[in-house]
């Protein structure tokens, strides 16, 4: 959360013509309320428990066109999702990280027009969906720490990782 995934996805769209497939949009089409983080997390966790990541792969497959050579999935949250995507597509997995204090500051600053309490932020970060996303980084081809780089530098590093992979 707040690590810069959507910012990177938009940069890859703008610089490389990538098409963005947003997991939150797939979940919204499956009944989750758009913009409601708890509802998106709840449905994502339910689907993950039922399908071990296949729900995300199916959502990506339904959006893929052979005319577009590059897709960015924003975002892969579990090892099962990453493994299933790799088995279905030729993938380059770019994982973004940042220090916990940095992430909490970014998330609080981006909250719906109000400062979140420490307890609210802790509750969000302790959700199993968020904790699972920490483990998926071990499967990445490239890992980038966004707390020490500008958005442009993150994008450049990601593009370099795509070209080397």
Image (tube, rainbow, N blue to C red):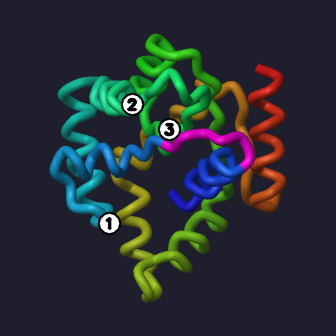
Disc 2 to disc 3, C-alpha distance? 8 Å
Q: Position of residue 113 (x, y in %)?
A: 44, 87
Dot label at residue 60: 2
Residue 88 is drawn in which quadrant? top left
Q: Position of residue 4 (x, y in %)?
A: 62, 56
For label 2, the SS is helix
For mark 3, what is the residue?
73
Q: Position of residue 44 (x, y in %)?
A: 27, 43
Where 31 falls versus 133 (above or below)?
A: below
Q: Residue at x 43, y 58 (%)?
A: 125
Where 70 falls versus 40 (above or below)?
A: above
Disc 2 to disc 1, C-alpha distance? 20 Å
Magenta-span inclusion, residue 125: no
Q: Residue at x 75, y 40 (%)?
A: 158
Q: In this rendering, would 65 be left or right of 97?
A: left
Dot 1 or dot 3, earlier in sequence: 1
For mark 1, what is the residue?
35
For label 3, the SS is strand
Dot 2 or dot 1, earlier in sequence: 1
Residue 53 appearing in the image: no
Q: Position of residue 127 (x, y in %)?
A: 34, 53
Q: How packed is label 1: few (under 14 Cα within 10 Å), some, or many (20 or more)? A: few
Q: Residue at x 46, y 18 (%)?
A: 83
Is the residue under label 3 in contact with that under label 2 (CB below 8 Å)?
yes
Magenta stretch: give its range. Answer: 15-20
The quadrant of the rendering that contains the C terminus is top right
Disc 1 to disc 3, C-alpha distance? 18 Å
Is the residue under label 1 in contact with that under label 2 (CB below 8 Å)?
no
């Amino acid at each position: 959360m707040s690590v810069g995934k959507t910012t990177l996805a938009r940069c890859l769209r703008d610089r490389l013509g990538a098409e963005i497939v947003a997991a939150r949009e797939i979940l919204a089409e499956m009944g989750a309320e758009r913009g409601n983080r708890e509802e998106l997390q709840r449905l994502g966790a339910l689907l993950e428990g039922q399908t071990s990541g296949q729900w995300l792969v199916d959502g990506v497959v339904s959006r893929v066109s052979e005319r577009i050579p590059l897709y960015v999935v924003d975002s892969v949250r579990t090892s099962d999702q990453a493994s299933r995507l790799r088995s279905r597509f030729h993938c380059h997995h770019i994982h973004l990280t940042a220090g916990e204090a940095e992430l909490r500051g970014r998330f609080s600053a981006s909250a719906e027009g109000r400062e979140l309490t420490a307890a609210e932020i802790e509750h969000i970060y302790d959700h199993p969906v968020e904790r699972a996303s920490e483990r998926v980084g071990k499967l990445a081809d490239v890992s980038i720490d966004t707390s020490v780089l500008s958005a442009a530098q993150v994008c450049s590093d990601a593009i370099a990782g795509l070209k080397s992979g």
